[in-house]
């Protein structure tokens, strides 16, 4: 399914958070959104679902404005995993994941064999089946994160939006989640994920969109757009790009600061921090 963002503006009261952003994600594409804190990434993602209403512009699924669709219709096609989602901590993982089936259930909300199958598949895919009966409150941050991913998958969406799906995860689970997203993506799911980790974005995304101060700074394949000047403009620090010897993909890194990196240390004195308040 194709998702189109047309000149979208989003904000909070009078504060502008997303200031005229447009792009299209084709069916089966995987796009990473990167950018510094406060640049509008989460707001943009919320605007792409029905969570936040744009002050102008529109978002379309296969050409239909999501505002012209019911919340249920949108939820049958699009799932969003927002940042630090909230649910009762007494809820078990299985109960949480079942919530992903609501958009597919009839008015009687009878659980069908298809619901059970989708929930079991989603818990397996997100590596949560082993703690299906445990309460959310008893899980580690990473385990809880995977339970939320399972919830989104149980919805069986054609478009999946994720806000920092790898935060709280150790490196093996980060890679596992990215592999899972890539696999779903190969099977036809359109995936848009806000990622903090530029290395993961470069390795797994077909396209990287960078946000800065509510606007899009660049949009393109990682090999074309991840270069020092663009990244420096976006993040405001000196950056460098290595090349992955196995894939040829860029590995963006902050340039080492000679004063702070032990190996490159030149012996110049560090300027003192301001004294703490007494
Ligand atoms: P990012 O995801 O890139 O960190 P956000 O979309 O969360 O950025 O925030 C963009 C801007 O909107 C920031 O200036 C932030 O302070 C502001 N903002 C975000 N959420 C709210 C809110 N609930 N109320 C008021 N301002 C908000």
Image (cartoon, rainbow, N blue to C red):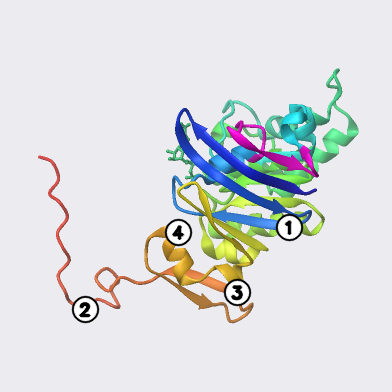
Quadrant of the rendering where the C terminus is positioned = top left
In the displayed structure, would residue 265 be above or below residue 74?
below
- Disc sitting over residue 29 in the figure: 1
Q: CA distance from mark 4 to mark 1?
A: 23 Å
Mark 2 secondary-structure assignment: loop
Q: CA distance from mark 4 to mark 3?
A: 20 Å
Q: How far from the left and from the top, in percent, is residue 90?
A: 59, 26
In the displayed structure, would residue 213 be above or below residue 257?
above
Q: How far from the left and from the top, in percent, is residue 58?
A: 67, 38
Label 1 close to label 2 by CB (< 8 Å): no
In the displayed structure, would residue 5 be above or below residue 102?
below
For the point 38% across and 71% down, the residue is 255
- Which is nearer the N-term, disc 4 or disc 2? 4
Badge 3: residue crowd in 10 Å (few <14, some 14–19, many ≥20): some
Q: Nearer the viewer, residue 111 or 16?
A: 16
Q: Which residue is mark 4?
A: 234
Q: How far from the left and from the top, in percent, is residue 251?
A: 52, 71
Q: Can you tell me whether the CB of the residue at mark 1 lies under 8 Å from the nearest atom of ligand 1? A: no
- Nearer the observer, disc 1 or disc 2? 1
Q: CA distance from mark 3 to mark 2?
A: 32 Å
- Disc sitting over residue 16 in the figure: none
Q: CA distance from mark 1 to mark 2?
A: 46 Å
- Disc sitting over residue 249 in the figure: 3
């Amino acid at each position: 399914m194709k998702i189109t963002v047309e000149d979208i503006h989003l904000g909070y009261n009078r504060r502008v958070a997303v200031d005229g952003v447009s792009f299209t994600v084709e069916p089966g594409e995987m796009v990473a959104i990167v950018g510094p804190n406060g640049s509008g990434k989460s707001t943009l993602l919320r605007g792409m679902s029905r969570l936040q209403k744009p002050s102008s512009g529109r978002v379309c699924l296969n050409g239909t404005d999501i505002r012209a669709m019911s919340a249920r219709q949108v939820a049958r096609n699009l799932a969003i995993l927002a940042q630090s989602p909230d649910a009762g901590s007494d809820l078990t993982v299985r109960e949480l994941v079942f919530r992903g089936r609501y958009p597919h259930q009839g008015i009687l909300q009878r659980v069908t064999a298809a619901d059970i199958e989708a929930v079991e598949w989603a818990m397996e895919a997100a590596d949560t089946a082993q703690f299906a009966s445990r309460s959310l409150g008893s899980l580690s941050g990473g385990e809880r994160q995977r339970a939320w991913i399972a919830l989104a998958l149980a919805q069986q969406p054609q478009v999946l939006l994720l806000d920092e799906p790898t935060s709280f995860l150790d490196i093996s689970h980060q890679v596992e989640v990215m592999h899972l997203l890539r696999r779903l993506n190969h099977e036809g799911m359109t995936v848009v994920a806000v990622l903090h980790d530029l290395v993961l974005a470069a390795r797994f995304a077909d396209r990287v969109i960078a946000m800065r101060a509510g606007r899009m700074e660049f949009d393109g394949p990682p090999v074309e757009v991840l270069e020092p000047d663009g990244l420096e403009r976006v993040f405001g620090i000196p950056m460098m790009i290595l090349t992955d010897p196995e894939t040829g993909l860029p590995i963006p890194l902050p340039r080492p600061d000679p004063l702070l990196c032990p190996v490159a240390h030149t012996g110049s004195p560090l300027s003192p921090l301001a004294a703490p308040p007494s």
